[in-house]
Amino acid sequence: MTKLIIDADTGSDDAVAILMAYQNLPEKNILGVTLVSGNVPLEQGILNTIFVNELCDVSVPIYRGASKPLEREYVEVYKTDEANKIALSYENYSTSAQHVHGVDGLGDIGIKPEGNKIEEETAQEFYSRVLEDENEIEIVTLGPLTNIAELVRKNQDKLSKIKHCYIMGGSSNALGNVTKFAEYNFWVDPEAADIVLNSGIPITVIGWDPSLYDAMIDSDKIKEIDSIGTKYSSFTNDIQVVLREMMKDIFGTDSYDLPDPLAMAVYLDNNIISQSVEVNVRVDTRDGMTRGGCILDFLNLEPEAPKVKVVQRCHGCLLYTSPSPRDATLSRMPSSA
């Protein structure tokens, strides 16, 4: 079985996606989790990942990655109006998403890890070692692509060892959640996203848009998750409290979406994809209204450019409640623990 690296900016939906991986895969097949600044600053993301390790009683190694985008400044924001002001200024800044996930990224409900175990190796040192030692790996990315862009830059001669990369980012229909056109992960570091998408690595992109249709947790589903009655189901709902309040303010509904868990579900079982397209994707790196937006070459105007699979819709998969085809001998889902 091909081994996995998870790259994350662990906020509330990343935590659920990591939980899914831990519950559906043998621990020995997860080489490590690398962290990047995004939803929360780097050090907070590390603490949140340590907590998920403790919650699941695993010892998956955690590695410190990039604390800022490749070419942009990164600032923390705690309020929606502050985040919107920066995003709509169209200047050379990227922001955290603490107004969405909470200051601590996990809903500000007082979650803190008991330990602080993190590997001494940096994320880039870890990548280089793994690409030297392993025959092939797969990567699931849940945050800005800064770490993976640096991997691409520094390991050109070993990229063939990356069997596949599953990326949560962008959108297939020009729908944005930071600006009118840009999804958060690609907006934070558009330069990194463009490098990775055009690296030639086999890639599947799971954008923000399918989560609105296929991973939207409404009030009935929130109750369904609560009714499961495990520490994992409680954790899944509890850490979404800040996001749920934001959804109530904006849309008047008690709901939340789970884009990162949807990306992890696609990794665990490609059969949940119901609609996709193979195209070249560029990311707008210019400052301005369309920064971070996805440009999909549906007309195949550049036939030689690298193509990636862009997921447009999935079969409903809110809770991944059957054993992963990647490990059919185990059933370790959040709902069964």
Image (cartoon, grey):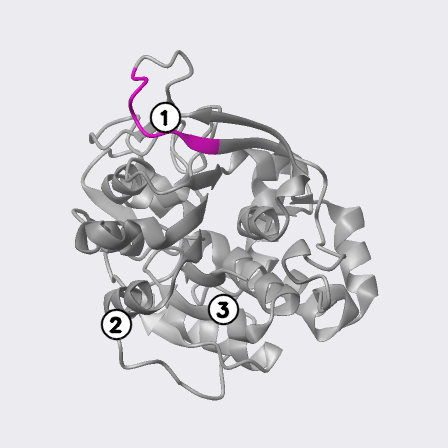
The first of marks 1 and 3 along the sequence is 3
Give the secondary structure at mark 1: loop
Q: Residue at x 55, y 46 (%)?
A: 259
Q: Is residue 54 left or right of residue 170?
A: right
- The amino acid at mark 1 is Asn
Q: Nearer the viewer, residue 81 or 119?
A: 119
Spatial CA distance of label 3 from label 2 is 17 Å
Q: Which residue is mark 2?
A: 122
Spatial CA distance of label 2 from label 1 is 31 Å
Labelled disc at residue 280 = 1
Q: Residue at x 49, y 57 (%)?
A: 101
x%, y% of residue 274?
66, 31
129, above or below 305, in the image? below
192, above or below 106, in the image? above
Q: Which residue is mark 3?
A: 30
Mark in the foreground, 3 or 2: 3
